[in-house]
Amino acid sequence: MTDIAVLESIFDTPSWVLEIQKRCAGNSATDFLKSAIELAEASARSGCGPFGALIVSADGHIVAAGWNNVILNHDSTLHAEIHAIRRAEHHFKTHNLASVPGAPLTIYCSCPPCIQCFGAIYWSGIKEVVSAGSKSLAESAGFDEGPIDQSLWQKAHQNKQIKFKLIDDPVLKPEAPFKLYKKLGGRLY
């Protein structure tokens, strides 16, 4: 394991990620969202982007964590959700997360997924997406989320039975990772 942000492998896990996973109470969607937001803040502190995601099994166990590592790893696809999906698929040694023990899986996101992450979720086999905040949080911070809207999530539910739930609760403080990222001089991409 390593503590540096630039990883030898996207499957390495920094100690700060392990600490967040250990602290996660994991009894409710709100608990997992709080941990995803905490992961996004820690990601920003480590020089990565202000996004975090957790994939959780039906029985409430964290299967994988993902954080945004686009800039430090020079990989435009290494968004938090895609990172978590890659780590879960690697863990289970499959490309179809619908077929793994503990399925159906839920991905908890610190911010609604962008268009790229929507595509990865759509093909991954994940059956539920729970997100904090709103798309406008990322966009007001300067991030381009692409042409994603509720109609795409409705099609995903119709075609792949993927549920999307937005929990826009200010108590979660979903804006905190973006404020921290800006304060630290984080680069937009």
Image (cartoon, helix red, strand yellow):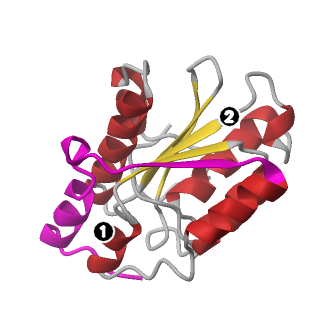
Residue 113 in percent (x, y) is at 52, 62
Q: Which amino acid does label 2 sit on?
A: Leu
Residue 107 in percent (x, y) is at 57, 43
* 134 horizontally vs 7: left or right: left
Mark 2 Cα within 10 Å, few/some/many (few <14, many 20+)?
A: many
- Position above or below: 33 against 189: above
Identify the residue position indicated by label 2 in the image: 105
- Position above or below: 93 against 83: above
Identify the residue position indicated by label 1 in the image: 137
The answer to which of 129 and 117 lies nearer the viewer is: 129
The answer, for residue 137, to whether it is visible in the render is yes
Q: Please give the name of the residue rendered at 30% of the width and 42% of the height, measured from the top-left corner.
A: 38
Q: What residue type is labelled 1?
A: Leu
Q: Which quarter shows the C terminus?
A: bottom left
- Position above or below: 33 against 4: above
| Labels in figure, total | 2
SS at circle 2? loop
- Position above or below: 182 against 121: below
Mark 1 Cα within 10 Å, few/some/many (few <14, many 20+)?
A: some
Residue 136 in percent (x, y) is at 34, 72
90 in the magenta segment: no
Residue 155 in percent (x, y) is at 74, 64
Tag of residue 177:
none
Which residues are the magenta region?
A: 160-189
Q: Disc 1 or 2, which lies upstream in sequence?
A: 2
Q: In which quarter of the image is residue 156?
A: bottom right
Q: Please give the name of the residue rendered at 67% of the width and 61% of the height, measured from the top-left corner.
A: 154
Q: Please give the name of the residue rendered at 23% of the width and 59% of the height, measured from the top-left corner.
A: 175
